[in-house]
Image: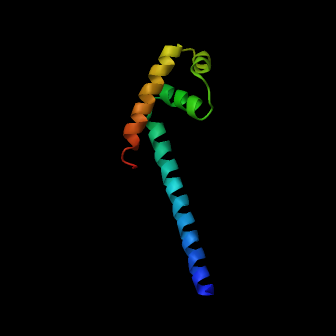
């Protein structure tokens, strides 16, 4: 039974290691995709999704209209989805 427990623990460690590796790969893929976006789209996407700004705050901070913020975010998400297709 001790051998069985050791084997189970080893399997758990391998699984955790694999998940961590997959997490790093996803992070790298996301970063590469973000770097391919036009600067304004990247900034707005990060402001919205990482920082939690609303559209009005983003418009005020960047000096563009709320409508244009929406357009840029739509385009950024569309591009990100396309760039991340290969990762799946």
Q: Residue at x 48, y 21 (%)?
A: 70
Q: Is residue 86 left or right of residue 77?
A: left
User: Looking at the picture, does residue 14 appear above or below residue 77?
Assistant: below
User: Looking at the picture, does residue 26 appear above or below residue 6?
Assistant: above
Q: Residue at x 54, y 70 (%)?
A: 14
Residues 58 and 9: in front is 9
Residues 81 and 27: in front is 81
Residue 33 appears at what percent x and percent y?
A: 44, 40
Residue 69 appears at what percent x and percent y?
A: 51, 20
Q: Residue at x 50, y 57 (%)?
A: 22
Indicate the quadrant where residue 1 lies. bottom right
Q: Residue at x 55, y 65 (%)?
A: 17
Tally of numbered discs:
0
Q: Is residue 5 left or right of residue 28?
A: right
User: Looking at the picture, does residue 9 appear above or below residue 52?
Assistant: below
Colour approach in the figure? rainbow
Outermost residue to the front: 1
Residue 73 appears at what percent x and percent y?
A: 48, 26
Residue 65 appears at what percent x and percent y?
A: 52, 13
């Amino acid at each position: 039974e001790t051998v069985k427990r050791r084997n189970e623990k080893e399997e758990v460690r391998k699984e955790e290691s694999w998940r961590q590796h997959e997490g790093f790969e996803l992070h790298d893929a996301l970063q590469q995709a973000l770097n391919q976006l036009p600067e304004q789209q990247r900034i707005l996407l990060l402001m919205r999704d990482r920082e939690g700004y609303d559209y009005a705050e983003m418009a005020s901070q960047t000096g563009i209209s709320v409508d244009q913020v929406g357009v840029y975010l739509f385009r950024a998400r569309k591009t990100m989805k396309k760039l991340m297709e290969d990762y799946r």
